[in-house]
Amino acid sequence: MNDPNLTPLVALPVVVPMLLGILSVLLRGSLGVQRALSVGGMAVLVVMNAFLLVKLGSLESGAPPLLYSVAGSWPAPFGIAIMFDWLSGLLVTITSVIGLAASFHTMDVMPERNERSWFHPLLFLLIMGVSFSFLTGDLFNLFVGFEIMLMASYAMMCLDGSKRVLAQAYKYVIINLIGSSVFVLAAGMIYGVTGTLNFADLARWVSEMNTTEGGVPTAFIAVSTMLLFVFTLKAAVFPLWFWLPDSYPTMPTTVSALFAALLSKVGVYAVIRLYPTVFGPMGTPSAEALSPILAGMAAVTMILAIVMAIGAHSVRRVLLLVLMSHVGYLIAGVVIGSIDSIGSVSYYMMQEMLVMACLLMATGMLERHAGTDDLREFGGAVQRAPALGVVFFIASLAVAGIPPLAGFYGKAGLMREAFSTGNTLLGLCIVVTAALTFIAMGRVWCAAFWGELRGAWLVAPEGGTLGTAPRLGYAFAGVWILLAFAIGAGLLPGPAARATNAAAELIVEPAPMIDTILGTRAITETAEAVAGDSESAS
């Protein structure tokens, strides 16, 4: 049962960054105070989210999510539900950790002019939108969370103001406006077909249609395809990925790290949350129609993106292509559809959020030493920045899935489930992608850090002395925070796996979630009250 004293706290991961963002705007004249507010505010969010996770873990096994109804006495599906379960709770906690790391990192790496240009208020707005997207319990408010997140991303992308950035920002905005338009239209059509937008109520409706009516209407499958188009566009899945490799490398590295770690994962989260219970429950006609499409997209995304990464010369572009390739892992795990595969997907996604943010932030620090991220123009950086080389090396092993780091457990679980459930082609793609990821990351580390020292900023001119190394103490604090959490997830695989498997159970077998969120008696009473109000008005 939900603790009535605890459930209002579920809204705080959304409310607190909103309030801190407003306060940051009022303090915009003092950069030092804004920095302190960002670090302190993000630290508070981390502690608060961790507290909610501990409270969730103290409940009995198989406990339903913590639920808070925003609309006063109106219960779901009539009111707005915010739900904190293992999946949304872990993702919101990791989001706040990445926000904390970004608050440190930007102090040393982002030009002060850009940082003063609304970065800190926009950071809070971005964290608010991402957290609301993870916590909301209905489609319309998922759209609202997407829009808050995207509004912040549009502004953050343009902080630099250069022509190159603005040219890519134009493409990014147009693509996302198209996706948002399709999203709101599809949500309206879903409501027209089902009469609800609440996740739990949609899952109940789909289950009833599949058991008593012989399957969902064809119109519902068509609209589900539209929503999957939106979510895979946000996640950058083939063939809807063309915008990401050109857009993200143009931004300041702190912003690029935030976008890579958070924005694409919101699209993947929407697929994980809705596909197994609403769009394509296993063994249903909708799954038979949609699963082959998603499986093909996942397979091509994995192989093509990682092959492109091996041939790229920019460190940022390599990392972003690896990120896109591994989105294919996540979609493949959703298509497989078992509790263990969804658990492995959740485990891998969470560690990759941390590791990818760490690698991209480390790349920004590397650019401060070498002056570029083009592997053809510098090398041997470990001789000038050995600590940075260690960070990049460990994070590269994590993203490549080398044990005992957390990436290994997620990949191994996906491989096992793919082959054991008869998805042999997806299993082979996962194996090949894992091997090529190791090659791609090894190539980057060897080219950038190992070998002969070369590069205009790393090597002193003849007869001169090498300039002073950049001061990156705050940036190191950011990357070490991320790396510590990623290493912890690998060294404590038991608790992490139990948490992600608990999340997967509520997704694949959502009956406890449906009972908790809907509450049949409350729905009946509310419906009768609505009918009574209508009769009185007439």
Image: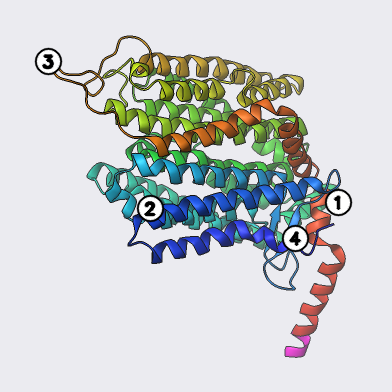
Q: Report x, y in % for residue 413.
A: 70, 24
Cα separation, mark 4 vs mark 3, equals 67 Å
Tag 4 secondary structure = loop
Provide the residue designation for mark 4.
6
Q: Residues within 10 Å of mark 1 (few under 14, many from 20)?
A: few
Tag 3 secondary structure = loop
Quadrant location of residue 490? top right
Residue found 48% across the figure and 14% down from its top: 439
Q: Which mark is residue 463?
A: 3
Q: Is residue 282 left or right of residue 245?
A: right
Residue 531, can we see it?
A: yes
What segment carries the magenta color? Answer: 534-538
Q: Earlier in the sequence, mark 3 or mark 2?
A: 2
Q: Amino acid at mark 3?
A: Gly
Q: Report x, y in % for residue 208.
A: 82, 52
Cα separation, mark 1 vs mark 3, equals 84 Å
Provide the residue designation for mark 2.
119
Cα separation, mark 1 vs mark 2, equals 53 Å
Provide the residue designation for mark 1.
212
Cα separation, mark 4 vs mark 1, equals 38 Å
Q: Residues within 10 Å of mark 3 (few under 14, many from 20)?
A: few
Tag 2 secondary structure = helix
